[in-house]
Image (spheres, rainbow, N blue to C red):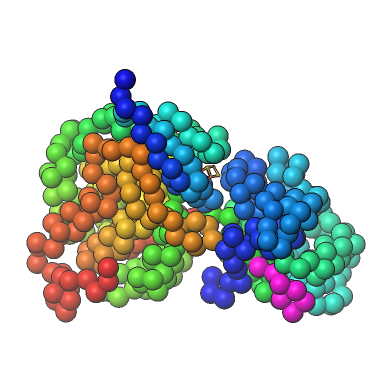
């Protein structure tokens, strides 16, 4: 049996309520218990595991290393005249700041779900 | 949304005795909104909890949220702006035309009664959802309810707050605002930020075919956007960062798997009332975080000669 890890006051990011009073019980690669989370939050936490279900990266649909994919991404973005950086919903503010930095560097457009 | 009269959810919990939900269905979309922040909690100045509060639901049909409401007002689809405008007139004691009010599906008496209750409240709050802000009128509707809340402050304390959707969309607004000065749809092609919704918003750009590369993170436009936009994403080199291989990944040139925000990636997210909260991930992912991959892409781009000589390739922000 993998060890049970308990995280108190965990934060759920599934909806805009961002409840920060969840108690998570994790066993190995998955979360088994989500105290105080609603049904949406519970399935969100339980749907994401730490298993390796997907390849690290894909280039043209073929498995690749992260380093190669990062390099390919940088090439495409650098060469583009009007690249777009879009999304920013399910990521942290730290990642959003990086996205702004990159968008400025490549001279692109940056946009989020808010524009829909 | 400059000049928004708003507050935090903590204030709602401790003070609000009159709560309107307009064009939203919290019972199904924000399940703990009622119990954690707005209706049932006992607050410092609302010691009786649910009994001390009145809740009104305005929507085009009665959703499961209606069960929690003291009053349900059914507005005709696409008539939200007209209804808000009539309410704003009644708040100021202006005459309104019966027939035109009837087009909203409600009577002048119903609206007058609502206005009386709003004015009688000690602390009122109006939450508005996508049923208001994404239907006919769109941001004009949002501007109208924000104006209604602001104008009610001539009589009592009244605030408004958008019911933001999933994940960290609120954080995106906040981060873009404090780094570029604008909340979304920002064009940095000239080396400085320009904001023009409709011109620089993603769907418009993609449908017109303006972009020649795209990086998508924390979203799956391949599943949600109009078909012409998706087709353009498939035509150009698209790069996707996501914990799963998504619809967009399948039409992309490059996909990089990342750790899931909040589950296995740490950081900060903003609640809908723009309060930042730290994440406490319970799992350790075998994949890098979005933050780390974005940093690595940026460092890779920085190795190349600058396209904008004046900045020497060094961005001024972040
Ligand atoms: S626990 Fe439920 S209400 Fe709270 S943030 Fe998660 S999904 Fe939203």
Q: How many marks?
A: 0
The x, y position of residue B224, in whole percent, is 46, 43
The x, y position of residue B68, in whole percent, is 74, 45
Q: Residue at x 28, y 38 (%)?
A: B284
Residue B153 within the segment the image draws in magenta: yes
Return the residue found at the far top.
A1
Q: Quadrant of the N terminus of chain A?
A: top left
Q: Is residue B242 visible?
A: no
Note whether B135 is above or below B147 in the view shown: above
Q: Is residue B283 left or right of residue B127?
A: left
The picture quadrant where one finds residue B184 is bottom left
Q: Residue at x 83, y 64 (%)?
A: B117
The x, y position of residue B23, in whole percent, is 67, 53
Q: Is residue B63 visible?
A: yes
Q: Residue at x 43, y 43 (%)?
A: A8
**Span shown in magenta:** B152-159
Note whether B53 is above or below B174 in the view shown: above
Residue B207 within the segment the image draws in magenta: no
Note whether B81 is above or below A74 in the view shown: below
Q: Nearer the viewer, residue B74 or A30?
A: A30
The picture quadrant where one finds residue B143 is bottom right
Q: Residue at x 30, y 42 (%)?
A: B259
Q: Is residue B14 left or right of residue B290?
A: right
Q: Nearer the viewer, residue B103 or A111?
A: A111
Q: Is residue B220 left or right of residue A80?
A: right
Q: Nearer the viewer, residue B41 or B77?
A: B41
The x, y position of residue A93, in whole percent, is 36, 58
């Amino acid at each position: 049996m993998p060890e049970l890890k308990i995280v108190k006051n965990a934060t759920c990011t599934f909806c805009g309520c961002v409840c920060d009073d969840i108690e998570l019980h994790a066993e190995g690669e998955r979360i088994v218990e989500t105290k105080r989370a609603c049904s949406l939050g519970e399935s969100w936490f339980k749907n994401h595991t730490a298993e390796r279900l997907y390849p690290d990266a894909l280039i043209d649909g073929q498995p690749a290393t992260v380093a190669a994919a990062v390099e390919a991404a940088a090439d495409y973005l650098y060469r583009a005249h009007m690249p777009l950086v879009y999304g920013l919903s399910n990521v942290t503010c730290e990642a959003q700041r990086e996205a702004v930095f990159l968008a400025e560097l490549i001279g692109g457009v940056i946009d989020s779900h808010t524009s829909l | 949304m400059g000049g928004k009269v708003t507050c935090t959810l903590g204030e709602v919990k401790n003070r609000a005795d009159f709560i309107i939900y307009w064009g939203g269905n919290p019972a199904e979309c924000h399940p703990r909104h009622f119990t954690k922040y707005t209706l049932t909690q006992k607050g410092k100045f609302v010691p009786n909890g649910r009994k001390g509060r009145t809740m009104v639901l305005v929507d085009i049909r009665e959703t499961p949220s209606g069960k929690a409401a003291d009053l349900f007002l059914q507005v005709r689809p696409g008539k939200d702006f007209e209804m808000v405008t009539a309410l704003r007139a009644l708040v100021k004691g202006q005459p309104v035309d019966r027939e035109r009010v009837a087009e909203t599906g409600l009577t002048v008496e119903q609206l007058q009664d609502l206005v009386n209750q709003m004015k009688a409240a000690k602390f009122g709050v109006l939450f508005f959802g996508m049923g208001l802000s994404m239907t006919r009128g769109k941001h004009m509707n949002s501007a109208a309810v924000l104006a209604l809340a602001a104008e009610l402050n001539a009589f009592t304390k009244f605030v408004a707050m958008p019911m933001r959707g999933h994940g960290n969309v609120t954080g995106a607004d906040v981060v873009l605002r404090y780094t570029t000065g604008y909340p979304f749809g920002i064009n940095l092609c000239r080396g400085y930020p320009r904001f023009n919704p409709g011109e620089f918003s993603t769907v418009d750009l993609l449908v017109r075919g303006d972009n020649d590369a795209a990086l998508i993170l924390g979203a799956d436009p391949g599943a949600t956007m109009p078909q012409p936009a998706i087709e353009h994403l498939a035509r150009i080199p698209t790069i996707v960062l996501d914990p799963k291989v998504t619809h967009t990944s399948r039409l992309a040139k490059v996909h990089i798997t990342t750790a899931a925000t909040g589950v296995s990636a740490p950081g900060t997210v903003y609640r809908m009332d723009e309060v930042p909260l730290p994440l406490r991930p319970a799992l350790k992912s075998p994949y890098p975080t979005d933050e780390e991959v974005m940093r690595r892409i940026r460092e890779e781009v920085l190795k190349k000669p600058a396209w904008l000589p004046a900045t020497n390739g060094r961005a001024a922000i972040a």
